[in-house]
Image: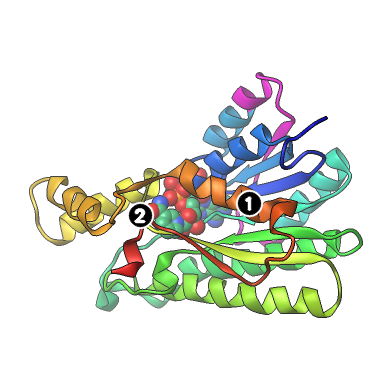
């Protein structure tokens, strides 16, 4: 008997070339899913998918800017052509803009929203179209910054709050129509990925510090369980993607080592 938690399921994971997205794709493959990894970074994404496929995994890669509706259409066509159905969508791709509010332009704001909020909206809308005949699970990777704020991340915080609340509206929409599609949000706290590495450098520069050690030490201290790993988030996403969470929709899964309970 096959006891893998995602056996027979087909998934799209966006932003899968690095960090949490890559860890999620790996966890999904480990649990028996077929995975379409997408990312705007073709080089790293294709290399990662090739490496996984060479170990026997059922995985393909597609170049994809989540802010582009045309790219999303191509991704949905590909998943149908190659796998015949879609059961899971993980809207993971996101960007952070660590910048003072007075230095944040309207273009900056729109760029962040275009990826973090609009990308999640477009993907969810199109995925519902493919899933509504048989059901599915949509997981939106938001952030604890959707719940607590950070003075150097106004556009990011607001875009993640939009994604968080959109998740609840989408969950209700699907439940009201008896689509058997669940929509949930995951909120990582401070997780060691290329994004966090860039953030540490940006905060260090904003404070005029000579190196990153003080900022790294501060973040390790403010998280009761320390800085997290990408696989910690991926494990939560597997739960929400699997049938183990069949009674869970519109919920917030905070995975932050206790950061926001202080
Ligand atoms: N790392 C953290 O501490 C943390 C905390 C809270 C939330 N998050 C969220 O988790 C998600 C993943 O973060 P991460 O830390 O792995 O980031 P990361 O920067 O390490 O990786 C993100 C991936 O998304 C891709 N990407 C960026 N813009 C894209 C676009 N327009 N279209 C397609 N792909 C795009 C990048 O190329 C990259 O491969 C993001 O939504 C982020 O906001 C991360």
Residue shown at 44%/76% (left/top)?
158
Comes first in the chain, label 2 or label 1? 2
Q: In the figure, residue 109 lies in which quadrant?
A: bottom left
Q: How is the image coloured?
A: rainbow
The answer to whether residue 64 shows anywhere in this view is no
Q: CA distance from mark 2 to mark 1?
A: 20 Å
Q: At numbered mark 2, what does the secondary structure look like: helix, strand or loop?
A: loop
The answer to whether residue 99 shows anywhere in this view is yes
From the viewer's perspective, is 38 left or right of 261?
Answer: right
Q: Is residue 83 above or below residue 67?
A: above
Q: Is residue 241 above or below residue 160?
A: above
Quadrant where the image shows the N terminus: top right
| Residue picked out by circle 2 | 190
Q: Which residues are magenta?
A: 50-70
Tell me, yes or no, whether the two marked residues, 2 and 1, touch with CB atoms within 8 Å.
no
Residue shown at 86%/47% (left/top)?
80
Q: Residue lying farthest right?
A: 133
Q: Residue 213 appears at what percent x and percent y?
A: 14, 45
Mark 1 CB lies closer than 8 A to ligand 1: no
Q: Nearer the viewer, residue 55 or 243?
A: 243
Quadrant where the image shows the C terminus: bottom left
Residue shown at 37%/55% (left/top)?
257
Q: In the figure, residue 51 lies in which quadrant?
A: top right
Is residue 72 located in the magenta-colored stretch of the structure? no
Q: In the figure, residue 2 lies in which quadrant?
A: top right
Is residue 62 located in the magenta-colored stretch of the structure? yes
Q: At numbered mark 1, what does the secondary structure look like: helix, strand or loop?
A: helix
| Residue picked out by circle 1 | 239
Q: Count neighbours of disc 2 (C-alpha within 10 A) and say few if under 14, some if 14 to 19, many if 20 or more.
A: many
């Amino acid at each position: 008997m096959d006891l893998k938690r995602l056996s027979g399921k087909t998934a799209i994971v966006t932003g899968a070339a690095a960090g949490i997205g890559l860890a999620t794709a790996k966890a999904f493959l480990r649990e028996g899913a077929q995975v379409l990894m997408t990312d705007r970074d073709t080089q790293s994404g294709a290399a990662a998918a090739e490496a996984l496929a060479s170990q026997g995994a059922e995985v393909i890669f597609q170049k994809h800017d989540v802010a582009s509706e045309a790219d999303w259409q191509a991704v949905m066509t590909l998943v149908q052509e190659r796998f015949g159905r879609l059961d899971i969508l993980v809207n993971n791709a996101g960007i952070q803009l660590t910048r003072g509010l007075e230095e944040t332009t309207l273009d900056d704001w729109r760029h962040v929203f275009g990826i973090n909020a609009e990308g999640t909206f477009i993907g969810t809308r199109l995925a519902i179209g493919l899933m509504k005949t048989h059901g599915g699970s949509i997981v939106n990777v938001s952030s604890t910054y959707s719940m607590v704020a950070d003075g150097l991340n106004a556009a990011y915080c607001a875009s993640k709050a939009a994604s968080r609340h959109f998740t609840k509206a989408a969950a209700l929409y699907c439940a009201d129509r008896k689509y058997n599609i669940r929509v949930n949000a995951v909120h990582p706290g401070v997780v060691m990925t290329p994004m966090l590495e860039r953030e540490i450098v940006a905060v260090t520069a904003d404070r005029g510090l000579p190196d990153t050690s003080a900022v790294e030490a501060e973040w390790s201290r403010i998280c009761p369980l320390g800085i997290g790993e990408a696989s910690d988030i991926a494990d939560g996403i597997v739960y929400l993607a699997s049938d183990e969470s069949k009674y869970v929709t519109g919920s917030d899964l905070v995975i932050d080592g206790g950061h926001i309970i202080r």
